[in-house]
Image: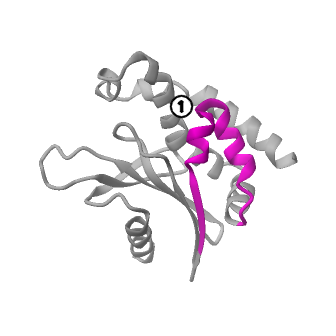
Amino acid sequence: MKNKKRYTRIFLLLFLLCGGLLFATPSLLIAATPVTEKDEISNIYTLHHAVLPGILFSNNGSLFFNDLFTGKTAPFLDIVEKPLGKSYASGIKIVPEHHPGFDLVLISFPEPIIEPLCVHAALVRKGSVFRYITLEKGNDIGKTGTKTFFCEWSPEHTHKNYGARMYDVVSEFDKDIITFLKQ
């Protein structure tokens, strides 16, 4: 119960502070989106690109990572349900993985509506250092087969794009992360 209260405060504070992030991004992201979906898209964007890395890179990052890694996902999913609904929260899949030298928490989200919402995200713990890596929905403008982009958010909230990918399945994302982290 203590963790749920802590998550709730952090989560809601970050949602309030970061809620306008989508509208600070290029307007083409929401230009063709019906008004009824704008708030939902903004909340999902905020969850993927501000709240999750915000908690991971905060003083509560270890607690948050450990809870998800050990299967204590209910407090997090309960909190996601408040702004995004039961259907969205129940569509989130969380899988912990241990690898030599690092641990991962893979998060798969319900299918994203628009670019750059996340298809999957990975919370990475390597020693005492955390990383937040995302697989973001992409558009295949050049007809090259692009489905997604492999990206990362830093603790300073800097976004890095490591390039287009032609997959959107979690198993390929998992392989890509493992290769990426071994470099």
| Residue that sits furthest to the front in the current view | 87
* Amino acid found under the numbered disc labelled 1: Asn
Q: Residue at horizontal 59%, vertical 33%? A: 84
Number of callouts = 1
Q: Residue at x 45, y 18 (%)?
A: 36
Q: Residue furthest bottom?
A: 100
Residue lying furthest left in this view? 143
Measured from the top left, where is residue 142 in percent x and y?
12, 47
Q: Name the quarter where the C terminus is drawn.
A: bottom left
Q: Is residue 145 above or below residue 46?
A: below
- The prevailing secondary structure element of the residues shown in magenta is helix
Residue range in magenta is 70-97
Q: Residue at x 44, y 29 (%)?
A: 22
Q: How busy is the neighbourhood of tag 1: few (under 14 within 10 Å), some, or many (20 plus)?
A: many
Asked whether residue 86 is drawn in magenta, I would say: yes
| 13 w.r.t. 157: above or below | above
Front residue of 176 and 102:
176
Q: Nearest the camera: 81 or 4?
A: 81
Q: Which residue is mark 1?
A: 43
Above/below status of 109 relative to 99 = above
Is residue 76 within the magenta segment?
Answer: yes
Q: Quadrant of residue 34?
A: top left
Classify residue 31 as left or right of residue 65: left
Measured from the top left, where is residue 130 in percent x and y? 59, 61
- Which residue is painted at 35% across and 25% down in the image? 30
